[in-house]
Image (spheres, rainbow, N blue to C red):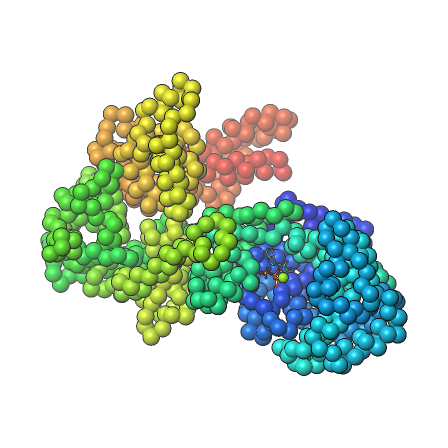
Amino acid sequence: MTEKDELSVNTKHKDFLRVIIDEDIRTNKYGGNVVTRFPPEPNGFLHIGHAKSICLNFGIANDYNGRCHLRFDDTDPTKEDMLYVNSIQEDVRWLGFDWNDNMFFASDYFEKLYDYAVQLIKMGKAYVCSLNEQEIREYRGTITESGKHSSYRGRSIEENLDLFTRMRAGEFKDGEHVLRAKIDMASPNMKMRDPLLYRIRHANHYRTGDNWCIYPMYDFAHCLSDYIEGITHSICTLEFENNRELYDWILDELELSLPRPYQYEFARLNLDYTVVSKRKLLELVEKKYVNGWDDPRLSTISGLRRRGCTPESIRRFCDSIGIAKANNNVDIAQFEFCIRDDLNQKVPRVLCVLRPLKVIIENYPDEQTEMIDAPYYPHDVPKEGSRKLPFSKVIYIERDDFMENPSKGFYRLSPGQEVRLRHAYIIRCEQVIKNANGEVVELRCTYDPATKSGADTGGKKVKGTIHWVAANQAKRVEVRLYDRLFSVPNPDTLDDVNPNSLEVLTDCYIEPAVVEEKLDVRYQFERQGYFYLDPIDSVDGKMVFNRIVQLKDSWTRAAKVEESKKEVKKPEVKQSAEVKQEAAVLTPEAEARLKRYQDNLGLNAEIADIIAKDADLSGFFEEVLYVYNNANSVGNFIANELSRELKDKNISELSFDAAQVAELVELIDKGTISWKIAKDIFEEMLEKGGSPKAIVESKGLMQISDARLLVPIIDKVIANNPENVTKYKEGRTNLLGFFVGQVMKQTGGKANPKLLNDLILEKLTNN
Ligand code: ATP
Ligand code: MG
C-alpha cells in the first residue's frame, strides 16, 4: 500500500461528502478541482476532534488529487498566539499530512476583506449601526418573535462609508459602532437578522500588530477566505448549519465571479470521558488539573503524542468512526482498540515489573547469570529479533502474581505451588518471608533446571506464566499509569475530573535490553500494556515510561462486573422456566463471568457459557489471555477443543500450560499452521506435553502460505491432468476439489487452504 492510499479515508463506502464531490466532478462544477481546507483558530492546541476534521479534509484532497489548505482563522486578536500556530503545524505534520505551499492566514486577507465590506456598503447591503451590544441583542427578537429594525438601518450609503472609514482610522472606541449586513430582521434564522460583519477592537494582533482596530466577524471572514483561496468544498461541523445561509448570502450578494465554494456540515467527534473543546481544555491547563497542553491524559494531539499513541492509530480511529450527519458520542474504548490494534503489530515485547516482590532462587548458583535468548515478537513467529534476557539468583516478580492464600482459579505463585517464569524456568515457592507488620517482603523459591522454556519439560506442567526481571541487571525506572481524565462519560464541570487519573510508580524494574538511550520507542511490557518512553522527562539517564493503553479494556470490564454484581442481588424478575433452570446452575461469580465474556470480550453466548460456568476453565482461559490476548480465538479453542478433553480430566492433570495453549492458538491465527495440523499438535501436547512451536519446527509442520512455493506444484498438477482441466472449463466446477486435493497431497496437507483455493481458481479461470 502506498502512503497515499494509507492516508486516504476508506473509500469502500463513500461518505455523503464524497458522493457530493463525485457529482460536482461529473457536472464539472469546478473544472475537476477539489480544494478543501482545515481552518483552525490559533487559540489553543488541537485535539482528537480536530484530527477527525484534518483526516477528512486532507483525506479528501488526497483521494481526489486535489489540495488541502492549512488556514489559520485568526480574526480575533484577543485570543490568538504564535505559540498555537506553531503547535498546530507540528500536530498536522505529525498526523502525517502535508499542506505543501498552502499555508494561509485569514489575517493576510484583512485588506481584501475590508474592500469587500466597502463594496457591500456601496451596494446598500451593509450599514453602520450604533446601537450598543445590549440593544442589538434586544432588537434581535427571539426564535418565536421577529426582531425590529435598528434606528440606524436607514443611514445613507455616504454616511455609512464615512463612518466605516473612520472606524478603521481609529476614531471610535470599542463597541461604539459595528458594521452589519442589511438582511431581514424577521428571518426565521436568527443568524440572518442583520448579522454583525465588523466590530471595533483596539487590540494588538499577534501578526498584524496595531495595523487594525476593526476586525471581521467569523461569518464574514470565513466564506470570503474560502473564496479568495479557491476552496471548492468548505467542510465544517454541524454547529455551523445555521451559518450556511449567511455564508451563501455574502458570497451571492457580492456578485463574485463563479465558481464559488459551498459549505457542508458533518457531525463533530465527541469522545466519552474526555473533553474536546479548546475552551475546556484551556481551563484544565490554566487551573492546573493537568500538567500543560501535552499532558498525556488530555485528548490533545500533543498529549496523545506524548503518551505514545501513533499517528496511524489516530488516523485509523478517525477512519473507523465514519462521517455522519448526526452528532453522537464515540465510546473511548473504540479509540483504545485502534491504538492497541496498531501497536500489537509493531512493538517488541519486553519484561518490566511495576510493583516488585523480591524472589530468591535458593538452588540457583550465587554468582551465575545466564543469558536467555528471548524473542521480541513471540506473538509473531516469522518476525525476527531477540535480545539476551539475564537470569540470576535474585529476581523481581509482580506483587500481584503472588497470593499467600490463593483463591480458586488463581494459577500463579502461592506457597508450595509452581509457576513458569516467562522465557525461563518453572519455580516453586518454598517459603514466604514477612516483615514485622506481617507483610510479605520476599519469597524463597527453587527452580527446576530441566524446565527451561522451549525445552522438553519432561512432562512438567504449570498453569500460569508470569513476568520477572533479574535484580542485578534490571534498571530502575518510573512508570506513569494513566486512567481516564473524567470519571463520567459526559463531563459537565471540572468537578467530574477523575482524582485518580494519574498513578506514578517510581520503583519499577525493567530488563537491561531496554536501557539503550533511544527516544521515540514503544514497547509492550508483557501482561501490563503498551508503554512509551516519555520524551520530556526521560533525562540524565532517568527513564520514565507512559502507559499508552492497557492490554485489555479493564475499565469497562470493572464497571460491568460491578454492574452485574448489582444485578445478581436484584429481586428476581419473572423468567421463563428454561431460563430459570439455566440461571440456577450458575453461581453469581459464574454469571458475572458470563456477562463479562459476552459484553467485554465479545465471545458468543455459547462459548462464553461453556467457559464461564466452570471456574477452573475460566481461570485457565484468562491465563491464556494474559499471554495471547485474542479472546475470540482463545475462547474458541478452549470451548471447542480443550473443554472436550476435560470431560474426564482435571486441568491440573494436563501436560501443558496456559502459555503453550496461547502459543498454539497464535500459530493458528498467524496462519503458520492450519486448524487441522493444530489438532494434531494438540493431540501430541495432550500425550507428551511440549511447546507447539517446538513440535511445529521439529516436524516441519509450517503451513505453506507463500504463493511462490505453491504455484509450481499447482502448475504441475494442472499439466498432468489435462482432461480434468477441460471438464472443469466445460462447467464441472466441482472438480476444483480434485485439484485442491492433489496439491494438498503433494504438500503433505500443509498448503494454506484458502490461498490454495484462490490460486487454483485463478489458474483455472485465466488459462
Ligand atoms: P473548539 O470547539 O475545540 O474550540 P473550534 O471549532 O473552535 O474547536 P477551530 O479552530 O475553529 O476550533 O476548528 C477548526 C476546524 O476543526 C473547524 O472546521 C471545526 O469544525 C473542526 N473541529 C473542531 N472540533 C471538532 C470536533 N470535535 N470534531 C470534528 N471537527 C472539529
Ligand atoms: Mg470555533
Q: In this view, does 573 lie above or below 345?
A: above
x and y, in percent, of residue 335 in the image: 49, 51
Q: Which of 460 and 739 is in front in this view?
A: 460
Q: Where is residue 600, by image quadrant?
A: top left
Q: In the image, ligand 1 is in what quadrant?
A: bottom right
Quadrant placement of the C terminus: top right
**x%, y% of residue 452?**
21, 49
Where is 630 relative to 235, above or below?
above
Q: From where the camera sits, is residue 697 visible? A: no
Residue 236: quadrant of the picture: bottom right
Q: Which residue is drawn at 23% across and 45% down?
A: 412
Left or right of 344, for residue 3: right
The residue nearer to you, when weighing 568 against 235, is 568
Nearer-the-camera pick, 717 or 85: 85
User: Residue at position x 33%, y 61% from top?
Assistant: 504
Residue 710 placement (x, y as % from top left): 48, 41
Q: In this view, does 357 lie to the left or right of 343?
A: left
Q: Does residue 624 appear left or right of residue 305 in this picture? A: left
Q: Locate the N terminus by quadrant.
A: bottom right
Residue shown at the point (65%, 81%) measured from the top left: 209
Residue located 44% across and 59% down the image = 297
